[in-house]
Amino acid sequence: MTDLVIHDEWQLPAWTETVGPGWAALLVRLHQQLLVLAPDYRIEKCERGLGGLRICVADRFDDQGDFDGQWADLATQLTDATETASERTCEICGGPGRPRFRGGAREVWITALCDGCAAELTRQAIPEPRGARGSGR
């Protein structure tokens, strides 16, 4: 695999550490695809929302200041495909997943998880009953 082009805070590698490894892989793939179209592309927004990624690329303009509609169309196709893939990809492990509600009484959010990662997170979140360990009963 070739090295990624050196990026700044306006390209997708800057966001890979803000999501789980499963989604970080999607961002790296999208980054590579966008580099082919425009090595100096810029991201305006990359965030979680409704169980998936939400990504907006900055518009591009030619030397005369005219809007580059072809860039917008191609970049939007790529970001839309990545957003859809994120909704079907476990954010933690990268396996097949689906959006699931998580949280508690004060806070609820949605993220895509596979069955295994969802079960593990549920096990970690449920405290063991008092006296369950070493109670001798």
Image (cartoon, rainbow, N blue to C red):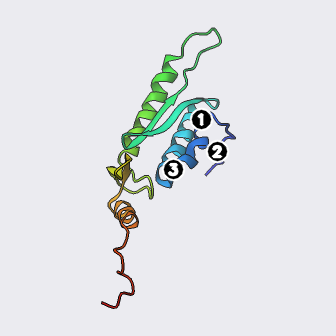
Instruction: Say whether disc 1 or disc 2 marks the residue closer to the N-terminus.
Output: 2
Q: In the displayed structure, does residue 2 sit left or right of residue 95?
A: right
Along the line of sight, the residue nearer the viewer: 55 or 70: 55
Could you say where residue 71 lies in the image, as x and y percent from the top left? 52, 23
Q: Name the residue under label 3.
A: 25
Residue drawn at (41%, 34%) of the image: 80
Q: Name the residue under label 2.
A: 4
Residue drawn at (49%, 17%) of the image: 69
Residue 126: mark: none
Q: Quadrant of the C terminus?
A: bottom left
Residue 35: mark: 1
Residue drawn at (36%, 76%) of the image: 130
Q: Do the residues labelled 1 and 2 touch (CB within 8 Å)?
A: yes
| Amino acid type at mark 3 | Ala
Circle 3 crowding by C-alpha within 10 Å: few under 14, some 14–19, many from 20: some
In three-dimensional space, the C-alpha distance between marks 2 and 3, rounded to whole angstroms, equals 13 Å
Instruction: Say whether disc 2 or disc 3 marks the residue closer to the N-terminus.
Output: 2
Circle 1 crowding by C-alpha within 10 Å: few under 14, some 14–19, many from 20: some
Q: Quadrant of residue 49?
A: top left
Could you say where residue 57 lies in the image, as x and y percent from the top left? 52, 28
| Amino acid type at mark 2 | Leu
Along the line of sight, the residue nearer the viewer: 80 or 1: 80
Q: In the displayed structure, does residue 47 sit left or right of residue 123?
A: right
Residue at the outermost right position: 6
Could you say where residue 89 lies in the image, as x and y percent from the top left? 39, 50
Circle 2 crowding by C-alpha within 10 Å: few under 14, some 14–19, many from 20: few
